Amino acid sequence: MVTRTAAETALERELRRVAGSVPDPELPVVSLAELGVLRDVRVSYAGDGHRSVRVELTPTYTGCPAIETMSDDIERVLHEHGQPDVAVVTVLSPPWSTDDISDEGRRKLAEAGIAPPRSRGSDGVVALSLAVRCPHCGSTATELLSRFSSTACKALRRCTACGEPFDHFKEL
């Protein structure tokens, strides 16, 4: 077992903060950390002292077209932060879930007019309900306009109370 020094873990925490601060390219109101797609950041050292950084990302779904942009953006910010050797890899297990979105990410989605996904209950099940709360007025009197919106992970809905259309981040 390799024991990590306090300096190594502090560096990993700092690099995780930097990588996690990258905005999602499709939902720039939330960061990759808030979206829950940033899984791990590890620093390793070769025998000659060469340092490399490995970042693990899990896409919101397997065919997510934004994963390449996310990877490029993370590499760029870590290079700018003095890390010349950065590898960003995609990991599919465990799969990403909308439960991975932080409370802060959910708040930011709602503030941006995107209805956040409903959370799973303590039993691990999303309550079966067709009601989606309007992020503009709070009404649950909403209707589905399209199963897909600007991205495959969102649906387009309209509030019948205030008349405003809005995106709903689908539960996965």
Image (cartoon, rainbow, N blue to C red):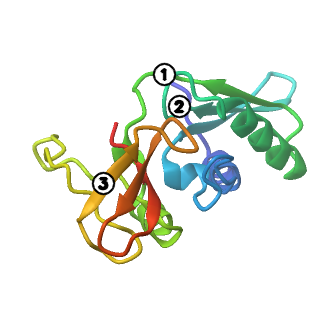
Q: Is residue 69 above or below residue 12?
A: above
Dot 2 and dot 1 residues touching (CB under 8 Å)? yes
Q: Position of residue 133 (x, y in %)?
A: 29, 64
Residue on which the image places disc 1? 92
Q: CA distance from mark 2 to mark 1?
A: 6 Å
Residue on which the image places disc 2? 58
- Please tell me whether mark 3 or mark 1 is closer to you in this view: 3
Q: Which mark is residue 146?
A: none
Q: Secondary structure beneath disc 1?
A: loop
Q: Residue at 54% x, 32% y: name it.
A: 59
> In front: 24, or 110?
110
Quarter location, residue 29 = bottom right
Q: Is residue 63 left or right of residue 141?
A: right
Which amino acid, mark 3? Glu
Task: Estimate how packed mark 1 is, as few (under 14), some (14 to 19) or many (20 or more) residues with alpha carbons within 10 Å.
Answer: some
Residue on which the image places disc 3? 143
